[in-house]
Image (cartoon, rainbow, N blue to C red):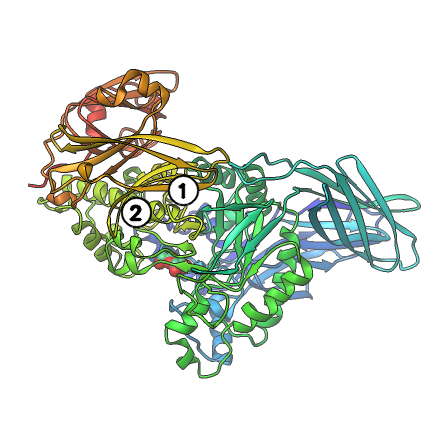
Amino acid sequence: MLEVTPMHEGWGLRHDGAVLPATVPGCVHTDLLAAGIIPDPFLGRNETEVAWVGRRDWTYETTLVPGPGGHEQSDLVLDGLDTVAELRLDDRLLGSVRNMHRSYRFDVTGLSGRLSVHFRSAYGEAEAVRGRLGERPNVYPAPFPYLRKMACSFGWDWGPTLVTAGIWKPVRLEHWTTARIARVRPLVTVGQGSGHVELHVEIERSRVEAGLRLGARVAGVAAAVDVVGTGAVVRVDVPDPDLWWPRGYGEQPLYDVELTLSDAGGPLDSWRRRVGFRTVGLDRRDDEHGSGFTFVVNGVRIFARGVNWIPDDILPARLTRERYRTRLAQAAGAGVDLVRVWGGGIYESEDFYDACDELGLLVWQDFPFSCAAYPEEQPLRGEVEAEARENVVRLMPHPSLVLWNGNNENLWGFRDWDWERRLAGDSWGEGYYLGLLPRIVAESDPTRPYTAGSPWSGSWEHHPNDPRHGTHHSWEVWNRRDYADYRLEVPRFVAEFGWQAPPAYATLRRALPGEVLAPDSPGMLHHQKADDGNGKLARGLARHFALPGRGLDGAGFDRWHYLTQVNQARAVAAGVEHWRAHWPVCAGTIVWQLNDCWPVTSWAAIDGDGREKPLYHELKRLYADRLLTLRPGPDGLVLAAVNQSAEPWACRLTLRRMSVEGEVVARADVELAAGARAVADARVPREVEPVGPKEFLIADEDTDADAARGVVDGARAVAGGAAVGLRALHFPVADREIPYPAPRFDVTVTPGEGTAAVVVTAHTLVRDLLLQADRLSPSASADRGLVTLLPGERVTIGVRGWETLGHLDAETVRSALYCVEPAR
Ligand code: BMA
C-alpha cells in the first residue's frame, strides 16, 4: 500500500550566511517575521520597510532521508511552490518550476541527501519575461501578468505589496509499488432519479505487466473494473440520492466516494473524496431585456446573493482550515449563498471548498487572471494549460463549485481601456478565455458551465460590460456618482459593485499604534490603497451628510469613521434593494467584497482583523429570504416585497407618513402578495408620500402578533424579544437637509452568561444607531449593526466578548453608541 511521509520538519531558510528555522508550509515573510528580522508588515508603514524581501532570491533546505524500504518507487510531492524555483538534491537538479498554482512530483527513488529549493525573485523573473515578450497594458504597474503567481501579491487597490516566496503548501514523500492512482476525474450527475458518479482514473505503473483492479463505493453501492493500460472508468449509480442544495433551498447531504486500486496481492493505493448530487446550469438565453445570466440549481432558478472573495491573508500560506471555516460561516451568517473567488487571487485550498460544500455556499471560481493583458507565448501558455487542467480536476468533486470564469475584467479592459490600440496585435489572453480554458473545462469537467469573463456580454457583439447582456460590473457609481444612481440600471447580473469604508476602530488602533487617527494621518493614508480613495469617500459622504465641523481628528475622526461606515452600508443597500426588486430580470448581486487580506480601508464587509463592519449586518437584512423595500421610481415611491423563499408571502403593511418629531401625518394599509421566489410591488399611495425635509415614510409588516397587540401604534421592540415583521424606511432628502431632533435615548445593560444585553430605548427619532462594541474592548462584538428607532421604540443589542472588561455600565456603553446627529 502507498505510504506517505510528511516532510514538514527540519527545514531551514538561508539568510545572510545563516540558516534560519523555516516553517513549511510557509513563506519567506513568515519565517523572517518569526526570526525577528522583519517587523510585522501589517502595522504602520512597515510594508515599505520589508519591500526588499521580494527583490531577493531565497533558498530553503532540508535533508531527504531514504524511504521506509520495501517499495519500488519514491516520489517527492510538493502541493505548491511560490513561484520560480530550482530543486536540487545535493548537486543533482531535480527540476525547475515556475507556477504557484501547480503541484509537482519528482522521482527520488533510492536517493537521499541535502534537498534545496532555490527561489528566484518573482520580480526578477517576471521582469525578465516582460523584457522578452514586450510590455502589455496593465491597470497596475507590477509585472504579475508575466508569471503564474497570485497577482495581488504585487499590491492591489486594497492590498499591500508583499511579494512572497516559499513552499506554501504541504510537502511529502510517497512510496509505492507496482502502481498508484495518478489522477481521478469524478463526473457527478443526476438523472432519472439516480445519482451517477463516473470516475475517470489514470494510473501510473512501475510494472506494466501487473493485473490491476479498481473498486469504487458510494453510499453502499459498489462497482469494480479491471485496468487495462493506464486508464479506467468506474461508474457507480446511486438510486434516489438526497440532493445537495445551496443554503436556504434545502440540505447539503454529502456522500463519501472511496476508490481502491489493487493487484492480486491486495490494495496498492486509495482515493477518497466527498461529492454531492445536484445539477447546475446557467440560463443565458435571449429575451426581451437582452440576454440573461441566471443560475439554475436542481431545476430551481436562483437570485444569487453573492459576495466577492479575495485571499483572506496576503500571505496565503498562513490560511488554516479554521480560518476559512470562520470567514465562510460569517458569509453564510449574512445570508450569502454565492461566493465568487476573484481572479487576482488563487485557486483556494480544499479547506475552502469543503467549507462551502458543508455550508451550502455556491462557488463561482475565476481562473487567476485579472485587470491586465496576459501574454499567450511560452513559457506562459504551457503553464496556464497545466495549471488549468490540474485545478479543474482537483476541484471537480465539490458540489459547491458551480461556475468557471475565464478572468476578471480583461475582456472589458481590451474593449474600453485603450488596450486594443496599445497592444497593436500582441497576444493579451483572448486565446485563453475564448479558446484554451473553455476547451479544458469542456474536456475535463463537462458538468459545469463556463463563462469567458466577468464582466462579459456573451460575445463581442455587445460591449463586455453592457448591463443588458450577461454579467456587469457597476463601478461608475463609487468612482464618480451618488449611490442613488444604482437605480438607473437593471443589469442582468451584477458581479461587482461596492463602496469603501474604514475598518473597525479596534482594527485601526491595532494596525496604527500611537497614531493620532485622522482620515489623512500617515498610517491611514498608507492603509488606503485605492486611486483617490479618500477623495471618493469624502465626496460620497458630502452628498449626504454635513461633514463634522470640527477637525477630523479626535471626536471629528470618530464621527467621520462612523459616517463613512453608514454610507457604505446605505450605498450597498441602495443597489441590492433595487436589483433584488427587479428579479427575475436581474438574477444576482455579488458585493465587492466580503473580506480583507490585511487591515485597510476597503470595500470589505469584514475587515482585516475579522471584525464585521455595519455593512456586514446590513447584508443580513438585504440577503434575507424576505426583503421589504421602499425606493423612488420614475412615477413616485415604490414598495416591494421581495420573496426568495419557496413559500408565498402575503404581506400586510401599515404605511405611516411621519414627521421627524414622531407625529403620524397620514397612514395607509397596503397588501402585497409575493409568490414563491417572486416579487410583488405597488406604488405607494399618494397620501402617505413624505414631502419635504421634515417627513419620512415608514412601512411596517403586520404579523399576526403585531396586529393582536396593535403594536405599530404603540411602542415596538425592534429586535430581541417581540416577534415583529419587516420594516422599510424612506427619507425623501439627504441627511444634511433633515432637521433631526437632537437624539435622546436611555441605555440599560444586563450582563448574562458570556454576553451582555444592551437595551436602548429611544425618546426621539434615532437614526442609524450603532454600537461599536470593539471600542469597549477589542474582543467585544455586537450582534447587530445599524438600526433606526422611532420615539418609544427599543432595541436589544447582544454584546459578546465584553467579559474581559469585568464591568460594563450604561455610561461606558453610551460612549460607544453612535447615531446620525442633526447638522449644525
Ligand atoms: C474591481 C475588482 C478589483 C478591484 C475592485 C475595486 O475591478 O475586480 O480589481 O479591487 O474593482 O476597485
Find disc 2 in the rendering and name its residue.
574
Say which amino acid is labelled 1.
Answer: Val
Q: Residue at x 15, y 23 (%)?
A: 763
Residue 421: image quadrant is: bottom left
Q: Quadrant of residue 643?
A: top left
Check residue 679 in the rendering and tell me which mark sits there, or answer none.
1
The image quadrant of residue 78 is: bottom right
Between circles 2 and 1, the one closer to the viewer is 1
Q: Note whether residue 27 is visible.
A: no
Q: CA distance from mark 2 to mark 1?
A: 17 Å
In the rendered image, is residue 824 in sight? yes
Query: Mark 2: which secondary structure?
Result: helix
Direction left: furthest residue: 824
Mark 1 CB lies closer than 8 A to ligand 1? no
Question: Residue at point 54% right, 37% down?
Answer: 249
Residue 490 is left or right of residue 521, and the answer is: right
- Which mark sits nearer the N-terminus, 2 or 1? 2
Question: Identity of the amino acid at label 2?
Answer: Ala
Which label was assigned to residue 13? none
Q: Position of residue 716 (x, y in %)?
A: 26, 22
| Location of residue 513 in the rendering, given as x and y in whole percent from the top left corner | 27, 43
Q: Nearer the viewer, residue 178 or 640?
A: 640
Q: Quadrant of ligand 1?
A: bottom left
Q: Is residue 743 above or below residue 496?
A: above
Q: Is residue 533 left or right of residue 204?
A: left
